[in-house]
Image: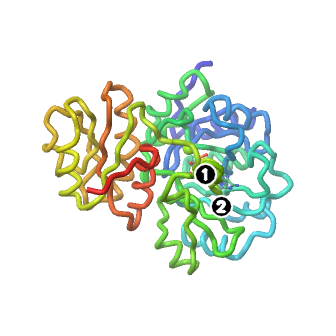
Amino acid sequence: MNTKLLTQNDIDQAAAILKNGGLVGIPTETVYGLGANGLDPEAVGRIFAAKGRPQDNPLILHVPSADWLERWCVDVPETAYVLAERFWPGPLTVILKRGPAVPDVVTAGLDTVGMRCPDHPVTRAIIRAAGVPVAAPSGNTSGRPSPTTAAHMLEDMDGKIDAIVDGGPCAVGVESAIIDLTVDPPRLLRPGGVTLEQLREALGDVAVDAAVVRPMGAGERPRAPGMKYRHYAPRAPVTVVTGEPEKSAAYIAAHAQAGDGVICFDEFAGRFPGKTVERLGPSHDKGEQARRVFDALRAFDSTSVPAIWAQCPDPAGIGLAVANRLNKAAGFHIVEA
Ligand code: TXA
Ligand code: MG
């Protein structure tokens, strides 16, 4: 298959591919998604094949506005509209009770479905033109870092999908926050661009699923099935170093071997001679760290570094999402400096 590169002007062409059961890479504010008609089980099946994604990992449905929720979900709670009003379009997925029109293959048989309204005008226009909710996981091969540019998505999906719409680099850089609204209190399943602090301000009590902050033990099941996989993993083993930036930099300088890879805050980039260095952004700018984290992990795949060391921000704000992605890349191999 020849994967076409489309531009922001090719909305009708992208929508036509979706309506015909094809696969299209779509830009969102978080990461690029691999979209298919969410009502067409065969098209959705092709997503799993193109990514090499386990069948037990459900997909989220993308809609252009909150008034589509009633079509695909049942018993939509008031909290969904409270969040949609504040944060949509934006980097937040809500888990709701699934309506009868949603195919089994989308939800991996669960009785709930993830719903998200992405903050990218081109993708919302494509969904509107297609007239169907678009099922879309992140556009990477399963197990690789999520793509934040069309070029990164092409690296993984060239020849496997019909087209990729280039909508520019992603503004947030990590995937959406996922909150389960079918339980009381609502539960954060994956931290993302809408922060835990913002969700608590909007809803009051919000629980945090254990899978956000630690690895799942044998026999334990995270509520978001995808959180059990060692995602975002570059080929070399990763060690995350937490603590004050000065201390974590000193720890890495003392422990990394010649030839190792280092992901560090910008101001420490000169501290690691003889190492391959990727910058995560300034230590005070977590937004930039979120935009950079997947690119930094992905960059090491084209190198032969035997090990990677990463500085990690504190968990306040979007730091929780950055730390979670680094920790998952490291298989939660974390040391405190
Ligand atoms: O920002 C995003 O959310 C991106 C862009 C493309 O929208 N999408 C994305 O999809 O990250 P994906 O499939 O890579 O991650 C979705 C996560 C997975 O961990 C999956 O297990 C979980 O959401 N999930 C999906 N449906 C669920 C459900 N009904 N209950 C619990 N978790 C669910
Ligand atoms: Mg993903």
Q: Which residue is mark 2?
A: 65
Does residue 289 appear left or right of residue 141 in this picture?
left
Q: Residues within 10 Å of mark 1 (few under 14, many from 20)?
A: many
**Up/down of 185 relative to 326, above or below:** below
Which residue is more in the foreground, 117 or 330? 330
Quadrant where ligand 2 appears: top right
Measured as percent of width and height from the top left, residue 139 is found at 55, 38
**Label 2 packing within 10 angstroms: few (<14), some (14-19), many (20+):** some
Of the pair 117 and 4, the residue shown nearer to us: 117
Q: Is residue 6 visible?
A: yes
For label 1, the SS is helix
Note whether 5 is above or below 326 in the view shown: above
For ligand 1, tell me if the residue under mark 1 lies within 8 Å: no
The image quarter in which residue 6 lies: top right
**Is 87 placed above or below 104 here?**
below
Task: Classify the position of the N terminus by image quarter.
Answer: top right
Q: Is residue 72 shown to the viewer in this render?
A: no
Amino acid type, label 2:
Ser
Q: Looking at the image, which residue sits at the far front?
A: 218
- Which residue is located at x 57 percent, y 79 percent? 205
Point out residue 107 in the picture as x, y percentages from the top left corner. 74, 49
Q: Earlier in the sequence, mark 2 or mark 1?
A: 2
Q: Nearer the viewer, residue 165 or 313?
A: 313
Q: Residue 295 appears at what percent x and percent y?
A: 38, 40
Q: Which residue is mark 1?
A: 124
Identity of the amino acid at label 1?
Answer: Arg
Q: Position of residue 195 (x, y in %)?
A: 47, 66
Does the residue at mark 2 contact the one at mark 1 (Cβ under 8 Å)? yes
